Image (cartoon, coloured by chain):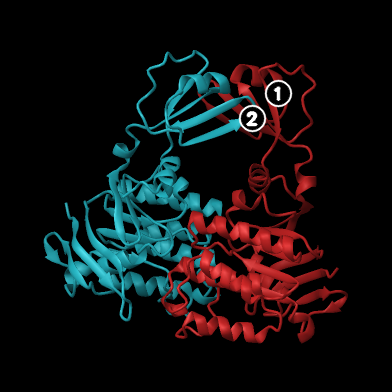
Chain colours: A cyan, B red
Amino acid sequence: MSKIEIKHLNKRLIGSKENILNDINLTFDGEKIYGLFGQNGAGKSTLMSLIADYNKTTSGEILLDGQEIHNNQALINKVYYMNQMDMFPKHEKLEKLFKMISNIYPDYDLSLQKELINKFNVDIKKTFNSLSTGYKSIVKIIISLCVPCEFILLDEPTLGLDARNREVFYRELIASYSKNPRTFIISTHIIEEVDQIINEVVFIKDGRVKINNSVDDIRSQSYSVSGPAEDVDSYVQGIHILEKDRLGRYETVHFMHELPENPRPESVDVEKMKLQKLLVYIMNSEEVE
Amino acid sequence: MSKIEIKHLNKRLIGSKENILNDINLTFDGEKIYGLFGQNGAGKSTLMSLIADYNKTTSGEILLDGQEIHNNQALINKVYYMNQMDMFPKHEKLEKLFKMISNIYPDYDLSLQKELINKFNVDIKKTFNSLSTGYKSIVKIIISLCVPCEFILLDEPTLGLDARNREVFYRELIASYSKNPRTFIISTHIIEEVDQIINEVVFIKDGRVKINNSVDDIRSQSYSVSGPAEDVDSYVQGIHILEKDRLGRYETVHFMHELPENPRPESVDVEKMKLQKLLVYIMNSEEVE
């Protein structure tokens, strides 16, 4: 199984005094789905562009199966980078655009492309330029799922997509991954929607990796406890609560901690915390260093 | 108070056989905040571009205080349209870009601009082109809130913004509106975040207006009922339930209907439904005709 290793990577933009990425050390193992999170300006897109060799590192290494990706066309061909730049011929009809791209890749999945064009209701007689923001994203998503690359980097793939189309995308991503396991790295600000999809979390803050862990590890000790407010409060007494949701007399409290030793009132229920709540908390927390 | 009236508007794109907008009749009253909703490709951006006279209607009228906006520069100046096209000089530093725009508008709010640049952590030494997707949206948002126009059209203003910056935007929008009431029309796919902000809902489907109503009216008969599952179920028996959320033994059911006549068990609580749940339901519903 292929993997990408990043070692002591630094990136400074020309004319800038500060690194936009600082001493990044990461491994992207084969056949996993990574969520790449971080605030606006954290360096997510820069990192992706470096992996895809759109850009040159200031120092450090990016290796694919032990070899430097930079300037190695055979390796670069294994990485597909969907991003916010509109690099397609703008005035060509989509049918021609799809044909051009499928001609570049020998094993491009034409039957999946046809299926996705239907599912997303894409009108292939339109030009790329005439598409709405959402449909520009959809065309890019379709191509990303059909190229025969081992590493697919998706930079905010759901930008401008409505709720229905986001759902179609998540479903098709999972279907495509199940049929043909490969590595996805997905950056997004809609964490609550990808928490069912990703296996691994990478969180970048101010150009540094703050979290690099599996979803299972992150969720191992985090709970949501619900029931009548007074019973819940007495049960979780002494535990540091991250958040409390209240509806009428019933409440749900969320915490990262072992379960309390207090006896659990019969009226109180315990579940694992949703990844999204957990990530939002961890990301907002200033304690993460 | 100024208002915009749209009468029997149709729009067909050149070379297309179908209208993208069909017999649109809408009034945007002064000093209200409108949410403009609809799926990808529904025609939201097209409608905004017509109001701002970026585009010409196929037939019908768009009036501002009774006069046609089209080709009337004095009226066009009252409308600001923030959109996904990047029409700014790409290689100029932001400080110069901000200066250019403030020079166009006599009463541009320079002090608010300064405040927002700080709150969003914008580096004005950067060029527009070098910004991340999120920061391009932020620069456009800042300008939209500072221009002295009576009608501000925001086409997916939060595109690419992280959770923190979305929050800053919503807060600043409300603050700016409270200080200087004017009309906002906001399109977005993140309905759950704007339901506290908007007063009016316009929902477009397949180029037609399906909902055009105040938030208060929409919410007038819609409830969320929570408590132990068996008590809730017996209380709401016979009512058509839109959705049920369950956590352990407790559940919340949502419906659009008068409250049941059954006696309410003491363990059961009743609240108004959240606008978001309601809108998502209405929008997904095929019954809306």
Q: Which of the chains bears the disc numbered 2?
A: B
Q: Is residue A187 left or right of residue B49?
A: left
Q: Identify the residue at horizontal 54%, vertical 57% (top origin).
A: B166
Q: Residue furthest left?
A: A66
Q: Are marks 2 and 1 in contact (CB under 8 Å)?
A: yes
Using a 10 Å C-alpha cutoff, classify the residue at mark 1 as few (fewer than 14 neighbours), some (14 to 19) or many (20 or more): many
Q: Identify the residue at horizontal 41%, vertical 16% (top origin).
A: A262
Amino acid beneath label 2: Val
User: In the picture, residue B263 is in which quadrant?
Assistant: top right
- In this rendering, the answer to whether A174 lies above or below B188 is above
Helix, strand or loop at disc 1? loop
Can you identify the residue that label 1 sits on? B236
Question: Looking at this view, is B227 or A143 the one in front?
Answer: B227
- Residue A264 in percent (x, y) is at 44, 15
Helix, strand or loop at disc 2? strand
Q: Is residue B221 left or right of residue B119?
A: right
- Residue B69 in percent (x, y) is at 79, 79
Question: Looking at this view, is B3 or B245 the one in front?
Answer: B3
Amino acid beneath label 1: Val
Can you identify the residue that label 2 sits on? B253
Point out the tag, 2 or 1, that comes first from the N-terminus.
1
Q: Identify the residue at horizontal 57%, vertical 23% (top origin).
A: A229
Q: Identify the residue at horizontal 18%, vertical 55% (top origin).
A: A3
Cα distance between the residues tagged 2 and 1: 8 Å
